[in-house]
């Protein structure tokens, strides 16, 4: 009976610890001024104990927009 309580406690702890990181998500899209877009993606972290959301591990990428000719 005690073994099942221990296993349940470990499972609950694992679920709480495993669900604190999400992402990467697009956090910012802006124009580069030369017919393109700058896209910023960041990982979102939730501190469940403090109720605080932080972003980290950001990366930037550029996307050049072109028009198709017919």
Image (spheres, rainbow, N blue to C red):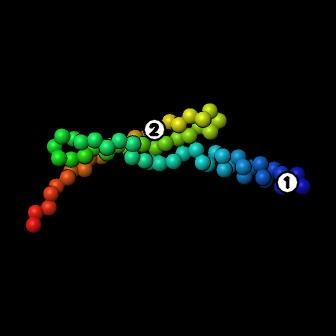
Of 2 and 29, nearer the camera is 29
| Looking at the image, residue 56 lies above or below residue 22 | above
Quarter occupied by the C terminus: bottom left
Mark 2 and mark 1: span between their CA atoms?
A: 39 Å
Quarter occupied by the N terminus: bottom right
- Number of other residues with Cα within 10 Å of mark 1, as a class: few under 14, some 14 to 19, many 20 or more: few
Residue 58 placement: quadrant:
top left
Q: Residue at x 72, y 52 (%)?
A: 11
Disc 2 marks which residue?
56
Q: Residue at x 16, y 43 (%)?
A: 34
Task: Determine whether, in the image, residue 52 is placed left or right of residue 2.
Answer: left
- Horizontal and vertical percent for residue 9? 77, 48
- Number of other residues with Cα within 10 Å of mark 2, as a class: few under 14, some 14 to 19, many 20 or more: few
Q: Earlier in the sequence, mark 2 or mark 1?
A: 1
Of 58 and 52, nearer the camera is 52
Residue 3 placement: quadrant:
bottom right
| Callout 2 touching callout 1 (CB < 8 Å) | no
Q: Residue at x 60, y 35 (%)?
A: 51
- Horizontal and vertical percent for residue 2? 88, 51
Outermost residue, bottom side = 70
Q: Residue at x 14, y 61 (%)?
A: 68
In the rendering, which numbered label is found on residue 3?
Answer: 1
Outermost residue, left side = 70
Task: Determine whether, in the image, residue 9 is placed left or right of residue 35.
Answer: right
- Horizontal and vertical percent for residue 45? 53, 41
Q: Callout 1: helix, strand or loop?
A: helix
């Amino acid at each position: 009976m005690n073994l099942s309580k221990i296993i349940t406690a470990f499972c609950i702890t694992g679920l709480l610890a495993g669900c604190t990181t999400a992402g990467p998500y697009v956090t910012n899209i802006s124009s580069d001024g030369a017919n393109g877009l700058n896209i910023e993606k960041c990982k979102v972290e939730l501190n469940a104990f403090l109720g605080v959301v932080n972003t980290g591990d950001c990366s930037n990428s550029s996307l050049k927009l072109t028009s198709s000719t017919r």
